[in-house]
Image (cartoon, coloured by chain):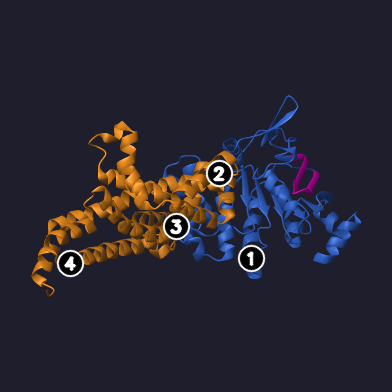
Chain colours: A blue, B orange
Amino acid sequence: MSLDKPVAPDRSENESTPTLQVKNLHKAYNGNEVLKGVEFAINRGQVKAILGPSGSGKSTMLRLMALLEPADDGAVFLDGLQIGTSNSKGKTIHHSEGKLAVERRDIGMVFQRFNLFPHLSALDNVALALISVQSIKRSDARETAFRLLERVGLADRASHFPSELSGGQQQRVAIARALVLKPHVMLFDEPTSALDPELVGEVLEVMEDLAASGMTMIVVTHETRFARRVANEVTLFDSGVIVEQAEPNEFFENPQHERTKRFLSHVH
Amino acid sequence: MLFDPQIFLEQLVNPAYLWGAFLSVGVAVFSLLIATVIGFFLALGRTSKKLFLVAPSHAYVWFFRALPALLVLLIMWNALPQLLPALRSDWYTPFLAASIGLGLVEAAFMAEIIRSALSSVDEGQALAGRALGLKPASVMIKVVLPQAIRTALPPTGNEFIGLIKYSSLASVISLRELLTTAQVGVNITFRYAEYYTVAIIYYLVIVTIITVVQSRVERKFLWTSKSVKRVDRTSRTSLNQLEEQK
């Protein structure tokens, strides 16, 4: 597995501008408030792990960041530019699905249940976005896709279909697929939660290599060991708010909040 | 009067039957095409959240599911040209009228097949397509439809066979399809057994061919690397070249 080349493209933004930022994010489903004004930001090259009990709103925040669902209130910024919504004369305008599609191309998303396209081979799963989004020639797209599959250690599975791959292999293909448009940031929504325990390692290894190559990553996870080893910062979510944010050692060894202590006593 | 093999064999190779069979299949193919296109948009309309799309789709299905196909064919051929002078010209043939008439009726049924096929595709599929930055039309064409087609194929095959048989209704608008061909022969010769047996043979052959073609098509939707080897050899070779390069 070789991730020698940095995956994140060179950008010359001001270092102080967060790569991805959300401000005052609110979301409710049927009157049930899932996000209650979340503030979150990640700088270029950082890896942030988000922990929290199920239903705490952490996955919802990721979906809102990926522009897969509209926020009720608040805004998302990519490299300092507002995406998903615009403000005009004090009103918030939600972008059309066509415009959102363009904005989503700079954000990579990896799902808990992989969501690979079952009718396409591993190679074509990765190549699809190049062909239909960037109109790149099929043979060139496949070459790029093949190189990405090499990076996640699946060159020998390129012609296999999702149904012929293990869960761990499927998730690695899904990571390659999310990387194909060179996103500025990668979002992982519990990427190992649907895997058999013995397959978790191979996926975390790919993610660790990706982090080492300089990719900006937000990882919602239950893998505390991964969070401790790879993340620059760990965040605890509970009941739609951020409870605690700290660098890993501080977070795990010396949590400030009672809620964090309680959560950690359950997962350890 | 015994079954006369001589008459049976003569009729079996009679070009009139072949032409009749050709018309039957033709009407079925065209009406299925019309039904699939209309049915697709009806299915989208019925699953939409907007009332101005939902209401007409429901009304269409309600209307055409209620009417007998025979009545629709009679309207298409007799009533419509009375109302619309443009339809009194030569291009408006019984074949065209039958194809459109059966297509309109069939669309109500295809709408349900397509709707359930679309809803059978896991929601995560469209989500992953959108996350990749695909536009709504691409999500539908590249991600959702190929998977929905697999689900829709077996019931659509059934509908196609049904349409082959429904095409015999077009005898009322003077289309000489397969069954009408047999009936015309019978009216002259009174050799019921021989002429009807020929019709049985033709229907059996047609449906057998459809069944074989359908299972061939379904095999393309297996989505395994083994099935690809056979269908798409070129992509495999280019892949092997890539593997050798590294």
First along the sequence among labels 2 and 3: 2
Q: Which subunit holds the residue at mark 1?
A: A
Q: Of discs 1 and 3, which sits in the foreground?
A: 3
Residue receiving disc 2: B54
Same chain for mark 1 and mark 3? The answer is no
Q: Residue furthest bottom?
A: B2
Going by the numbered disc 2, the residue's amino acid type is: Val
Residue receiving disc 1: A195
Q: Position of residue B125 (x, y in %)?
A: 56, 53
Residue receiving disc 4: B192
Secondary structure beneath dot 3 equals helix
Disc sitting over residue B88 in the figure? none
Going by the numbered disc 4, the residue's amino acid type is: Tyr
What residue sits 69% from the left and 44% below the top?
A65
Q: Is residue B129 magenta?
A: no
How far apart are labels 4 and 3 at the CA level? 39 Å
Going by the numbered disc 1, the residue's amino acid type is: Leu
Q: Position of residue B60 (x, y in %)?
A: 48, 45
Quarter of the picture holding the N terminus of chain A: bottom right
How far apart are labels 4 and 2 at the CA level? 50 Å
Same chain for mark 1 and mark 4? The answer is no
The part of the chain drawn in magenta is A22-37
Horizontal relation, residue A257 to residue A35: left or right: right
Horizontal relation, residue B79 to residue B108: left or right: left
Same chain for mark 4 and mark 2? The answer is yes
Residue receiving disc 3: B152
Horizontal relation, residue B202 to residue B139: left or right: left
Going by the numbered disc 3, the residue's amino acid type is: Ala
Quadrant in the picture for residue A98: top right
First along the sequence among labels 4 and 3: 3
How far apart are labels 1 and 4 at the CA level? 67 Å
